[in-house]
Every structure is written in structure tokens, then in C-alpha cells.
Amino acid sequence: MAFVVLACVSCGTAEPVASTAPEPMTPAPAPETPAPGSTTTAPSTPTPTPPPAFSAKVSDVTRDRLPYSWRPGCPVHYRDLRLVTLSYWGFDNKPHTGELVVRKTVTDDIVTVFKKLYGWRWPIYQMKLVDAYKADDFASIDANNTSAFNCRRATGSSSWSNHAYGEAIDINPLQNPYVTASGSTAHDNAKKYTERPMKGKGVINPGDKVVKAFAQVGWEWGGYWSGAKDYQHFSKGGG
């Protein structure tokens, strides 16, 4: 009987013991894998739109386009002149379209030179027929207008100007004025441009690429004249 009591005592409830086993770890999320065939593309930079290509069109001149610059008695008939409509680069750094009237025998020269000027983005202020100023050469120059044909006499002479033959052109006359042998100019807005060489937009200097481009087609620059200088002026064969 005593044996049974001892056995019951040894079977009493034991106190719980804290577990020393490590707790299971939460697995790290797996890296995301792009879907097959998908790629990450960086934002693209817009491609600048290129300027229009140079263009030139040569056409016959109608009498009504020359209401002031041509008249009976001019050394060249208007039927021997041509209208050249061409591209030029403006002072605003944008492409423009202008018009020149020249003799039909020199249209290739004009297109060749002005294609180069456009490719260089060499600036021209504006390019209108001198008839926009009623063939008033002084007014056209004051407006800094590039022009060619005008049936008029040479400055200070009774002889016909090369402009009257359609074989001369004046380019950016404000920046490239006619300067007398004494160094003066008749245009007040051009007085700061009488010296050469000088830097400036649309300025023509001795030996520069504009002078060379015209020389390559047989045109001479008035800036090389002795005495008076005509920095705006180019003519076929000089004069």
C-alpha cells in the first residue's frame, strides 16, 4: 500500500520549461523579374527639325514687276532680265525667301553664291526688289535692303551703273556702306560701319568667304576699289 502512494507523488505535474529552439524566419521577398521580352526605355530627346533646304527658282520678269526700276531707254530690255526667287538666312537666325532681278546671263552665278551663303547661314537683313522703294536707291539702302537690278546711273557719274545691266548686287548696305575717299558716308545709320576690317553680323571684310565666293564666279568686290569703297557692291567683271 505504501508503494502505491510513492508512485503517485512522482507523477505530479511539472512546471513548464521555456523552449530554446529558434523561431522560424520570415523568408525575404524574391526580386521582381521583368516579364519576358520587356525592357526599360529612357525618355527620348526630341530631334530638332532641320531647316528647309536651299531653293532657287529662275523665271521671266513681267513688266508689271518693274514699275519703277525699268523704263524704255534702259541699256537692257526687261525681257533679258530674270527674277530669281531664293532662300536666304535672316538676321533673326531663320530662313527666308527673297527676290532679285538680274540679267539672264548671270543667274547661275547668283544661285551658286547664294546657295553657299545659305549653307553657311551667313545673314542677310532683307531682300526685296528695289521697286518696293519706287527704285529710290537711297531709300532702299536706308532700309538695309539687298537688291540687284535698277536702271540708274553710277554714283557720281553720267554712265550707266552695272545695276542698270542687271550685273551687280548690293548686300546689307547698312553694314557695308559706300564710303568716300575721305571716309564719309551719306547714310547716318551706316556711319559706324565705315571702317574695315570689322566684326559684325552681315559685315563683309577683305578676303572673307563672301568675297571669295563671288570671286569664284567672276564677280568683283567694291571694297577693293582705290579711293572710294563700296563695301556692299559686287559686280560681274567689276565696276
Image: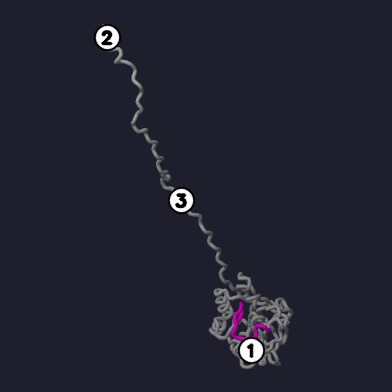
Q: Is residue 235 visible?
A: no
In the rendered structure, which amino acid carries the disc numbered 2?
A: Val
Q: Is residue 176 visible?
A: yes
Q: Which residue is mark 1?
A: 229
Q: Which residue is mark 3?
A: 40
Q: Which residue is mark 2?
A: 4
- Asked where in the image residue 9 lies, by quadrant, the reply is top left
Give coordinates of residue 42: x percent, y percent: 48, 54
> In percent of the image, x 61 and y 71: which residue is there?
93
Residue 234 vertical placement versus 84 (above, below) = below
Inter-mark Cα distance, 2 to 3 = 81 Å
Q: Magenta span covers which residues?
A: 191-203
Give coordinates of residue 66: x percent, y percent: 71, 79
Q: Are marks 1 and 2 in contact (CB under 8 Å)?
A: no
What is the magenta segment's predominant secondary structure? loop
- Report the residue that reaches farthest toward the front: 2
Inter-mark Cα distance, 1 to 3 = 65 Å
Q: Are marks 2 and 3 in contact (CB under 8 Å)?
A: no
Inter-mark Cα distance, 1 to 2 = 143 Å
How many C-alpha atoms fall within 10 Å of the one at disc 1: few (<14), some, or many (≥20)?
many
- Which quarter of the rendering shows the C terminus? bottom right
- Which quarter of the rendering shows the N terminus? top left
Q: Say whether residue 184 is left or right of residue 42.
A: right
Q: Say whether residue 51 is left or right of residue 27.
A: right
Q: Say whether residue 235 is left or right of residue 5.
A: right
Q: Nearer the viewer, residue 170 or 58?
A: 170
> In percent of the image, x 55 and y 63: which residue is there?
48
